[in-house]
Amino acid sequence: MAVLYVAGISISENLKDIPDKTINTINKCSLIIGEERKIALKMQNIAKSSAEIVLVNEHSTDDERKNILEKIEKSEYSVLFSDAGTPCISDPDYKLIAMCRDKGIKIISLPGPSSITSAISVSGINAKTFYFAGFPPRKVDERRKFFERIEKSKETVVFMERPYALTATLKDMVHIKRKISISLNLGSQDEATYYDYPDKLLEKLEGIKAPFVIVAGGKKI
């Protein structure tokens, strides 16, 4: 039976943080499925692997996924990982996982870090229950509704955006009149978490470009 490992890797650029168990598992795989070739090649090098590399990401078509599925079926061991953190969280990889499941391929997790839980852990915000909202839409009307839902939510909401969109995101949140937590560069040496009202954070962080996760506590009724 073919086996597909789903590996969580470092949420920072320091891939040396990855556990030996994960590295050793990648080493025995004959197929590496990455999100971007640069990271996949780094992982291949760290694991001292000669495995074939294929990519699956937001630009992949279903036909391309079917081709990858065929390669997985022909391989004894394959491994899937994203550029950072745990795969299939706001990533398109879940489609490939579903296809493998339907084909009876054994799927095994190699647990790793997640920027979502890391951001919650340092936020100081109650997250006994929380809602992960993914990435805000890009279309103006849909984006406005996204932030309106966060403003009205009674539950803690966690979401992320692309590194270059930090300023735009905080501008979209200035109408929210409660404090939020924003964590930059999680897992890196320059990691920093800020807790304040969105307009105050905008004054402090405007123009900064960095990977970030936002935690917004629920609205108190």
Image: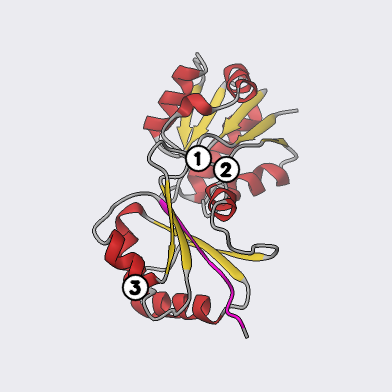
Q: Are marks 2 and 3 in contact (CB under 8 Å)?
A: no
| Numbered disc 2: secondary structure | loop
> Is label 1 or label 2 in front?
2
Q: Nearer the viewer, residue 190 or 160?
A: 190
The amino acid type found where label 3 is placed reads: Asp
First in sequence: mark 2 or mark 3? 2
The amino acid type found where label 1 is placed reads: Ser
First in sequence: mark 1 or mark 3? 1
Task: Check residue 215 for magenta coloring.
Answer: yes
Q: Nearer the viewer, residue 141 or 99?
A: 141
Q: Are marks 1 and 2 in contact (CB under 8 Å)?
A: yes
x%, y% of residue 149? Answer: 52, 79
Bounds of the magenta span? 212-220
On the image, numbered disc 1 is attached to which residue? Answer: 82
Q: On residue 86, which mark appears?
A: 2
Query: Residue extending furthest bottom?
Result: 221
- Neighbor class of circle 1 (other Cα within 10 Å; few <14, some 14-19, many 20+) is many
Q: Is residue 117 above or below residue 32?
A: below
On the image, numbered disc 3 is attached to which residue? Answer: 199
Q: Is residue 216 above or below residue 112?
A: below
Task: Check residue 122 for magenta coloring.
Answer: no
Tell me the quadrant of the picture where the N terminus can be found. top right
